[in-house]
Image: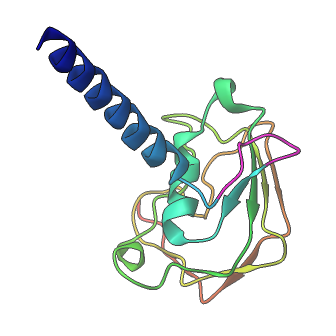
Amino acid sequence: MKFCNLLTKRLSILVLIASLSGLCFAQFSGGSGTEGDPWLIETAEHLNNVRNYLGADHTDKFFVQIADIDLGAAPWNEGWIPIGSPKTESFRGQYDGSDYVINGLTINTGSTVGLFGFIENGTLVNIGLGNVNLTAIG
């Protein structure tokens, strides 16, 4: 009986770990964030998750967009919060838009406007924007 209880507890822990690791990988369409295996950005959710990798600890992170992204649908059309801020942390990674387009970017709050708000020693290349609505307040 003790063996069965111990086995059940260990299996439960393994299932929990597997579930949590799946959540980590779901942040992007694939990749590991390295130069040779960049994180793949395919959806608005993936793009939003880039903000989880700000600051000096993430200067070695690489992102590549692999599809057009629509920010014109809820909740993104209610106002995009720029990635990186001088008040929080700057974006310091490498983002390659691969000539795909990000459509429907709407920003209507704060004085920082843009897809990326504050970049420090980071790189943004090949990003296309369409149907942009930017309004700076303050």
Q: Is residue 32 magenta?
A: yes
Total numbered labels placed on residues in the image:
0
Residue 1 is drawn in which quadrant? top left
Residue 108 position, x and y percent, is: 41, 71
Q: How is the image coloured?
A: rainbow
Q: Is residue 45 above or below residue 16?
A: below
Secondary structure character of the magenta stretch overall: loop
- Between residue 95 and residue 89, name the one nearer to us: 95
Residue 120 position, x and y percent, is: 74, 37
Residue 17 position, x and y percent, is: 39, 32
Residue extending farthest bottom: 131
Q: Is residue 59 above or below residue 102?
A: above
Residue 127 is drawn in which quadrant? bottom right
Q: Is residue 18 above or below residue 49?
A: above
Residue 19 is drawn in which quadrant? top left
* Left or right: 87 in relation to 39: left
- Between residue 25 and residue 135, name the one nearer to us: 25
Q: Is residue 68 magenta?
A: no
Residue 77 position, x and y percent, is: 41, 79
| Residue under the point 59% across and 39% down | 53
- Provide the residue span drawn in magenta: 30-37
Q: For the C terminus, which image quadrant? A: bottom left
| Residue under the point 15% across and 18% down | 5
| Residue under the point 49% across and 34% down | 88
| Residue under the point 78% across and 33% down | 60
Residue extending farthest top: 2
- Between residue 7 and residue 77, name the one nearer to us: 7
Residue extending farthest left: 1
